Image (cartoon, rainbow, N blue to C red):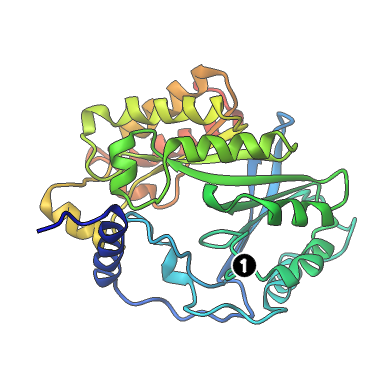
C-alpha cells in the first residue's frame, strides 16, 4: 500500500480537527464581535492606551490544531464595505471616531486569522479602512507568515507616511516536529523569511508564541518558549506575546483526555516572562486572558497574575 503524501496527511488532519469542533457563535458581518481599550508598554518605553478591535470575517483557512479563534468567524467572505463599517462602529462606541479628538494613538485590528487574506478582509476595502485609521500613529494587524506579500505593501501605501504598520505573526514554537504536528502549514524558516521580509520594508513585526503547545512535556516548555523568543527576535521581531496554550476547541480537549496536552502551570508563565525580559532583545508580554484557569490551589493565583500584569506594563521583572 502506498504511503500517504504530506498533502494527503495534512488534508486528513484538517478534517479531523474540524470534525472535533463544537458549534460557532453567531456573529454579524457588519459588527465586530468585540472591542476594547487597554494599556500596553509601547515601543517608545511609555505605557499607552491601545484600541483593539476584533473584526468579524471569514474563518482562517489554515485550521491549526490549537486554534479556537474560529468560534467567532463566518463561513463566507464578508460583503465589501462590512469591515469599514465594523471599524467605524467600534471607534464610535469607544469614542475614538474623531481625528485628533482623542489620545489613543495605537490600534490593533485583529481578525481571528489573516488581515491579508483577501477572503477575510476584501482588498477593495483597503482605502476605506486606511482612511478610518488616519488618527492613529501605529496600526497593528495579524497575519500568517505565508500570506506576507504585495497586499501588505498595498495597504501600507494607503496609510499616512508617518504611520507605523506592524504585523503580528504566529511563530507558535521553534520546535520543528511539534510545529508540523500543529497543522500550522509552515516551518520556522517560513516565519523567519516573512519577518525579515517585513522588517526590510520598515514594517514592524511582533510574534505570538505558545507556551506548552500540544505534545510538549512540561519540563521542556519553558526552554522551548525561550528558544522561540530568541528565534523571533533574531528574525526581526520587536516584541513577542507568549500565550499559554488552552483547551476548549474540541481537538485540544481530545488531546488532553489522551494525555497529549495539559495547560502550562502559572509558574511556567512566570519563568518565561522573566527569561524573556532577561534577553533584553525587545518587549515580552505574557497573555493573561483566562489566566484564572492556570491558578494553583494554594490561593496565590490572583496576586501572581496581578504581578504579571504589572511586569507586562513595566517590562521589568520584579
Residue found 58% across the figure and 69% down from its top: 120
Q: Position of residue 318 (x, y in %)?
A: 49, 21
Residue found 70% across the figure and 79% down from its top: 80
Q: Is residue 204 above or below residue 2?
A: above
Image quadrant in which the N terminus is located: bottom left
8 vs 259, left or right, is right
Badge 1 element: loop
Quarter of the figure with residue 3: bottom left
Q: Position of residue 76 (x, y in %)?
A: 52, 80
Residue projecting furthest to the front: 2
291 vs 46, left or right, is left
Q: Is residue 296 above or below residue 65?
A: above
- Most foreground residue, 102 or 24: 24
229 vs 271, left or right, is right
Q: Is residue 300 visible?
A: no
Q: Is residue 109 above or below residue 313?
A: below
What residue is shown with label 1? 118
Residue found 48% across the figure and 24% down from its top: 230
245 vs 27, left or right, is left
Characterize the local packing of mark 1: few (<14), some (14-19) or many (20 or more) Cα atoms within 10 angstroms. some
- Most foreground residue, 251 or 122: 122
- Most foreground residue, 145 or 54: 145
Q: Position of residue 299 (x, y in %)?
A: 28, 40
- Most foreground residue, 22 or 145: 145
Q: Position of residue 81 (x, y in %)?
A: 72, 79
Q: Is residue 72 visible?
A: yes
Amino acid at each position: 500500500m502506498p504511503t500517504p503524501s504530506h498533502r494527503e496527511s495534512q488534508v486528513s488532519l484538517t478534517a479531523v480537527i474540524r470534525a472535533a469542533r463544537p458549534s460557532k457563535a453567531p456573529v454579524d458581518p457588519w459588527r465586530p464581535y468585540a472591542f476594547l481599550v487597554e494599556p500596553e508598554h509601547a515601543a517608545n518605553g511609555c505605557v499607552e492606551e491601545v484600541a483593539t478591535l476584533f473584526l468579524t470575517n471569514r474563518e482562517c483557512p489554515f485550521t491549526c490544531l490549537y486554534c479556537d479563534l474560529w468560534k467567532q468567524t463566518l463561513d463566507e467572505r464578508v460583503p465589501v464595505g462590512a469591515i469599514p463599517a465594523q471599524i467605524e462602529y467600534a471607534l464610535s462606541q469607544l469614542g475614538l471616531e474623531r481625528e485628533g479628538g482623542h489620545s489613543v494613538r495605537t490600534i490593533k485590528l485583529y481578525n481571528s486569522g489573516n488581515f491579508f487574506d483577501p477572503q477575510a478582509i476584501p482588498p477593495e476595502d483597503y482605502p476605506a479602512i486606511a482612511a478610518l485609521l488616519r488618527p492613529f500613529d501605529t496600526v497593528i494587524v495579524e497575519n500568517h507568515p505565508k500570506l506576507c506579500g504585495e497586499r501588505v505593501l498595498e495597504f501600507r501605501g494607503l496609510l499616512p507616511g508617518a504611520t507605523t504598520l506592524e504585523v503580528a505573526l504566529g511563530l507558535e514554537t521553534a520546535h520543528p516536529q511539534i510545529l508540523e504536528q500543529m497543522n500550522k502549514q509552515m516551518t520556522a524558516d517560513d516565519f523567519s523569511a516573512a519577518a525579515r521580509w517585513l522588517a526590510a520594508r520598515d514594517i514592524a513585526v511582533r510574534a505570538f508564541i505558545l507556551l506548552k503547545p500540544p505534545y510538549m512535556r512540561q519540563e521542556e516548555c519553558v526552554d522551548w518558549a525561550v528558544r522561540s523568543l530568541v528565534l523571533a527576535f533574531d528574525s526581526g521581531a520587536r516584541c513577542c506575546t507568549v500565550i499559554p496554550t488552552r483547551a476548549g476547541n474540541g481537538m485540544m480537549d481530545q488531546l488532553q483526555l489522551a494525555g497529549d496536552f495539559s495547560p502550562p502551570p502559572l509558574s511556567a508563565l512566570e519563568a518565561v516572562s522573566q527569561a524573556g525580559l532577561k534577553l533584553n532583545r525587545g518587549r515580552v508580554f505574557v497573555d493573561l486572558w483566562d489566566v484564572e484557569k492556570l491558578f494553583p490551589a494554594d490561593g496565590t493565583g490572583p496576586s501572581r497574575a496581578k504581578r504579571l500584569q504589572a511586569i507586562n506594563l513595566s517590562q521589568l521583572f520584579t
